[in-house]
């Protein structure tokens, strides 16, 4: 009895110490979708950015990103570094305007016609550059002169002249969230796909090592962070961390990359792993809430290795029922996407390998199917006779971009071919994209 009591006390003390080492945020600010912002919202963001620019902050972020480029790309640190990097810019902005947050740009909402995105309108970040230097003359950074790496106008140069090649559709990202059991694999899919093609699509400063000159960078990486958080919630471990580290295999104790230009607080990458803890005091308007307690071996269903038992669709992760997430932030389309994918299994059974979580749910019921035809205003059937939406292939990453990052060209091509094959399977089934 004494030994039992002793162990209970020891466990309680250890749990308290663990919680103190990973303090929970007392409040969370919400990052909104860039697609939802009003002209007044953009103006307020522009006012903050102008002050940061005047104070040299934007140049410091660009300089820091360039200096750390090799450390934070093609390695697992890509995720925690950019999570912390965006947060630091946001924190500095909140010293100017306490309500400032970095909006996330869900590029899947614009994937088929990026140049037509409302995020690229005159009242937001502006569209293509002009003149021989492709200077950005409109938007919240219109007519800015940048100081790093030399004095030049902020440049934007679409990769198809006046248009932009297609980006990555939500369905491909949804597959990665469902099927990638390791963070290193998820990282390859993200870096070799949606991350790179959006940078390249906008071009100009956005397609350089000093991309933080363009505020697009922070909105894009806020979205990448949002997708990582969805994967963390789906994969079964928020502390899953493997792949390339600074000294071999990546570990949670690897130091957070930083330079003197942008102080990220030191410490290890562990500090940025879980939203809602250790100063990661924000959330998104389309993601799960942070866990009620910091995850660890004691409350992770798979002990933190990202390889939990996926055979039970009702299993719990961090004391919460398993959820199936979409790559899109369009909540109205998410349920339709998942139901239609499950319907498509009948024509393309191999799709189950791409969407294993959806496959666990089996064939959708009549009630589930009717959801996609129900409109609260007009009632069913609102989509009868509508043409089936065929998905487009995403753009390839340029050889310049691949070489700049030191990526393996063969692996990049494999990821591209996988995405195209998935799109072929969906297009050759009953699937019709709801986006």
Image (cartoon, helix red, strand yellow):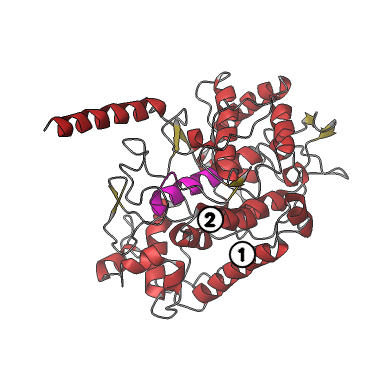
Residue 224 located within the stretch drawn in magenta: yes
Whether residue 207 sits left or right of residue 258 in the image: it is right
Foreground residue among 210 and 53: 210
- Residue 269 horizontal/vertical position (percent): 53, 36
Q: Is residue 427 visible?
A: yes
Furthest residue toward left: 1
The correct choice, above or below, for 244 with respect to 135 in the image is below
The structure residue drawn at horizontal position 55% and vertical position 31%, both measured from the top left corner, is: 87
The structure residue drawn at horizontal position 27% and vertical position 45%, both measured from the top left corner, is: 319
Whether residue 67 sits left or right of residue 11 in the image: it is right
Q: Which tag, 2 or 1, sits closer to the chain's start?
A: 2
Residue neighbourhood size for the residue with mark 2, other residues' Cα within 10 Å, grouped as few (<14), some (14–19), many (≥20): many
Foreground residue among 147 and 82: 82
The reply to whether callout 2 and callout 1 are in contact (CB within 8 Å) is no
Which structural element holds mark 2?
Answer: helix
In the image, the segment drawn in magenta is 223-239
- Residue 75 horizontal/vertical position (percent): 62, 48
- Judged by its main secondary structure, the magenta piece is helix
The structure residue drawn at horizontal position 51% and vertical position 79%, both measured from the top left corner, is: 428
- Quarter that holds the N terminus: top left
The correct choice, above or below, for 271 with respect to 77 in the image is above
Which structural element holds mark 1?
Answer: helix
Residue neighbourhood size for the residue with mark 1, other residues' Cα within 10 Å, grouped as few (<14), some (14–19), many (≥20): some
Specify the quadrant of the image occupied by residue 48.
top right
Residue 402 located within the stretch drawn in magenta: no
- Residue 383 horizontal/vertical position (percent): 40, 68
Total marks placed: 2
Tag 2 residue: 186
Foreground residue among 211 and 405: 405
Tag 1 residue: 415
């Amino acid at each position: 009895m004494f030994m039992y009591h002793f162990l209970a006390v020891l466990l309680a003390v250890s749990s308290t110490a663990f919680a103190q080492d990973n303090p929970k945020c007392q409040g969370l600010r919400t990052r909104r979708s860039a697609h939802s912002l009003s002209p007044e919202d953009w103006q307020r963001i522009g006012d903050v950015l102008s002050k940061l620019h005047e104070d040299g902050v934007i140049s410091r972020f660009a300089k820091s990103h360039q200096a750390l480029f090799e450390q934070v790309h093609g390695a697992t640190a890509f995720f925690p570094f950019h999570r912390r990097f965006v947060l630091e810019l946001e924190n500095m902005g909140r010293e100017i305007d306490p309500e400032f947050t970095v909006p996330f740009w869900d590029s899947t909402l614009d994937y088929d016609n990026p140049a037509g995105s409302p995020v690229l309108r005159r009242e937001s970040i502006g569209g293509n550059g002009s003149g021989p230097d492709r200077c950005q003359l409109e938007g919240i950074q219109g007519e800015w002169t940048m100081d790093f790496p030399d004095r030049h106008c902020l440049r934007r140069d679409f990769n198809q002249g006046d248009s932009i090649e297609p980006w990555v559709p939500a369905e491909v990202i949804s597959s990665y969230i469902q099927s990638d059991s390791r963070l290193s694999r998820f990282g390859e899919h993200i870096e070799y796909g949606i991350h790179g093609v959006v940078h390249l699509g906008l071009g100009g400063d956005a397609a350089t090592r000093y991309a933080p000159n363009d505020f697009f960078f922070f909105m894009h990486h806020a979205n990448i962070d949002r997708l990582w958080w969805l994967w963390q919630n789906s994969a079964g471990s928020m502390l899953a961390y493997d792949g390339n580290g600074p000294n071999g295999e990546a570990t949670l104790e690897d130091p957070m990359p930083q330079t003197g230009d942008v102080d990220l607080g030191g410490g290890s990458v562990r500090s940025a792993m879980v939203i809602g803890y250790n100063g990661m005091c924000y959330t998104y308007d389309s993601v799960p809430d942070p866990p009620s307690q910091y995850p660890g071996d004691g409350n992770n269903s798979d002990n933190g290795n990202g390889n939990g038992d996926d055979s039970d669709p009702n299993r719990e992760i961090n004391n919460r029922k398993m959820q199936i997430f979409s790559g899109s932030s369009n909540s109205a389309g998410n349920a339709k996407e998942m139901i239609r994918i499950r319907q498509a299994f009948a024509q393309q059974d191999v799709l189950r390998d791409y969407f294993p979580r959806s496959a666990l749910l089996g064939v959708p019921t009549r009630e589930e199917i009717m959801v996609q035809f129900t409109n609260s205003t007009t009632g069913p059937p609102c989509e009868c006779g509508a043409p089936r939406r065929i998905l487009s292939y995403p753009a390839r990453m340029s050889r310049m971009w691949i070489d700049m990052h030191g990526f393996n060209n063969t692996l990049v091509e494999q990821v591209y071919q996988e995405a195209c094959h998935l799109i072929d399977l969906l297009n050759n089934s009953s699937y019709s994209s709801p986006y």
